Every structure is written in structure tokens, then in C-alpha cells.
Image: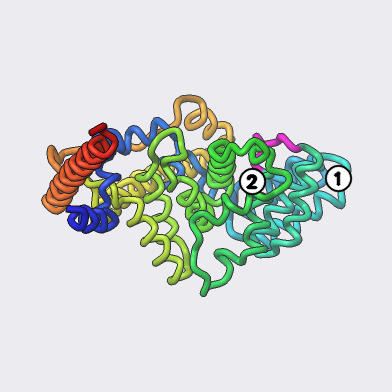
Amino acid sequence: MISLLGLLLTLFPTLNLFPTLNLACLWDHDTLLEERSVQPGLHELIVGHFPRHSRALYQWRIDTRLERGRDAWTPADYDTVAVAFDKLGQSEQAIEWIEKKYQRFPESGTYETQANWGTFLIHAGKLEEGLTHIERAIEINPDAHFGRERVQKWLVEYLIETRQHLDPERSWNGDGFLEFVRYQDDAPETKTGNTRELRQTLIHGISGMLRFGQHDSPILLAELGGLLSRSNEMSGATNMLAARALLRAAETTGNPKQAIDFREAAKRELEMQVDWSLEEVEKSLREEVAQADKLAVQIAADEKRWMDAGDDADAKYAEKYLGGAPPTLDVTDHDRTQHSVPPLHVGIRMLLQTVLFVCVTAIATILAWRRFRSTRRAISPG
């Protein structure tokens, strides 16, 4: 009997007994719509479904200001032109114009100057130089953008120290960024041991960088996916959002090795999602990105019409796209828990686990009772 119990116990790791006890929530509650309620707006950021300017609008901003002549420029005009060049992928031009701003207005708009300057250098691959300017911006205004620069600083420091994303041969470490920040002296959330709060701070910061920086950055998408992946430490499950962020990172990265890493990590996020396969999520993701592309085409057409008419395209854009509720993805078809029972292989696994649990419990109870009776006989008088 004891040897049989030992044999059954050796099967525990193989059959993963204890996770079975929580399986019901995996297909009753861990749905995409619930995740969207836990992290509102994050799904839209991951796929790029939010109002963002066309390339033509950024070129229009440059042209209209250059036509006016720089004598009439304010510090904000220099920022606008520099950011427009950066959005067009011309980081060196952006650096040149922010330097011109600093030369002309060294004491005006210093926070904006340093924050933009640092970001342009980082986008140009000059991480150490960019970090210096980001640190100056934080010194001037630590709370600007709700502390987003602080997260940007940690991310750049992480990239410099670990070479993560920079070395094409290095495997991606999904927990690396969070673990790195936990040991930074300027991360006050770690002083209380509140990992959940720190994780949310990092998610918030990276979300801001995606929205106001490069919405399809594979580095930002991958690290966001890594932060979302430990759903047990979040206020709700976020496996589906994590998988989408990682798959988007795999699509946008130019590093074939890390693309494989990201896709494998996305697959692991879906291992406990019995209603979804990786292929199904990829199909849904393509549909969601198509919605985002459609919105971008609509905005580009509107901006072209406004510019051709000689209107203030920035004002028209703000009126139409920023005045009301932000656009949301149509995900009604995606919140599907259509399997009334798990797939066959999952059902068989659950049945085996349940039988094993009952057998082990019964055997353990019998052995405990026999031991108890033997002990009573040994101590009974006579």
C-alpha cells in the first residue's frame, strides 16, 4: 500500500495535480474583455488603434514653420519641428533642431529641451548620451508626464547594462526589466516591497512611450508583454494582452532570434487559455491591427483635406479626434468562451488528475487511520 502511494505521488509533477484545482477560472473569467477592464486602453495601444498623426501632418508642421521664418519662432516651435523630424524617422535632424533651440533659448523650456533631446538621442541609438539628458529633465521636473521619464531612464539603463534587445545573439528575458528596476535606488515602490505597484508603474510608463513615442517599437512591446505576463501578481489576469504585445513585438523586430523568443513567450501565455490557440490569437490580432490601420487611413485622409483647404490641421484634428471618447476596438467576436467543455486532451488530463487526487486522498486517509489504530493498541492497558 505504501509503495502504491509513493508511485502515485511520483506522478504529481507529470500530471500537474494542483493547478487543476483552479482551472475553472481559466475559461470562465480569463477573457479578453475582462482583461481590457483591468487595463483600459492598453489593448488599443498594443495594436496602434488610437488617434495618431499621419506623416504628411508632421511634414506640414515643419513646412509651415519654416515658411514663417525663424525670427518669429518661439521655443515651442523648435520643439514642434524637432519632434516632427523624429516622428518621420529622422532622428539626426531632430537632434540638430533641438540643439538650435538650446542655442537660441538656453533658459526657456529647459525641461522640454532636455526631455526631447534625450529621447531623440536614444532613438538614434546614442543611449549613454540620451540618458544624460533624460536625467537632467527628471531633475528639472520629476513628475512631468506622470513620471514617464523615470521609466524611460530605467529602461535605457537596463538596455545599456544588459545589452538586452541590442545584442542579436542574446535571448530575451521576460522578467529582466522588472527585476532590474527592483534594485534601483530611485524606485521608491521597491522600498515597501510592493512589486505589484512597481509593475503597474512600469506598465503605465511604457504605455505612455508607446502612445507618444514609437507605437510599434519592438522593445516597448516586448517589455510590456513581459510585465503583463505574471497575471497572478496583477489585479486581474492579463495573459491575452501579454500574448498580443509579444506577438506584435515579434512582428516588428528585425531580430530573427528574438522574434522566436517573443512568439514562444506568447505561446506560453496561452497555455492555460484552453479556449484559444496561438493561431487563433494571431488571427484576431491581424483583424485588430487592420482596424487600427483603417483608423490611421481615415485620419490621414482628414488631415490631407484640412491641409489642402488651408485650414489649421492641428485644430481640426483636436476637434474631431481628441474632443470626445477615444476610439475603441471592436472585440465582441473575440470575447468567446464557446467551448462548453475543455478540448478532449484537456478533459482527459483533468479526469486523470481528479482520479489521482481521489485515490491519493483515500489511500492517505486509510494509512493514517491504520497508524492511529496501531498507536492506540500500543498504548492501551492490558
Nearest to viewer (mark 2 / mark 1): 2
Query: What residue sits right under mark 1 in the picture?
Result: 105
Could you tell me if residue 55 is visible in this image? no
Q: Position of residue 100 (x, y in %)?
A: 81, 54
Is disc 2 in contact with disc 1, using a CB cutoff of under 8 Å? no
**Inter-mark Cα distance, 2 to 1:** 27 Å
The image's colour scheme reads rainbow
- In the picture as drawn, the residue positioned furthest to the front comes out as 382
Kind of residue indicated by mark 1 = Phe
Q: Position of residue 149 (x, y in %)?
A: 68, 44
Q: Is residue 85 above or below residue 295?
A: below
Q: Position of residue 181 (x, y in %)?
A: 63, 49
* 306 relative to 31 in the view: left or right: right
Of residues 191 and 75, the one nearer the viewer is 191
Of residues 260 and 211, the one nearer the viewer is 260
Could you tell me if residue 123 is visible in this image? yes
Q: Residue at x 44, y 46 (%)?
A: 230
Q: Which mark is residue 151?
A: 2
Magenta-drawn stretch contains 382: no
Query: Image quadrant of residue 200?
Result: top right
Name the secondary structure under disc 2: helix
Query: Image quadrant of residue 195?
Result: top right
Name the secondary structure under disc 1: loop
The range drawn in magenta is 142-148
Kind of residue indicated by mark 2 = Val
Query: What crowding class fits label 2: few (fewer than 14 Cα within 10 Å), some (14-19), or many (20 or more)?
Result: many
Magenta-drawn stretch contains 145: yes
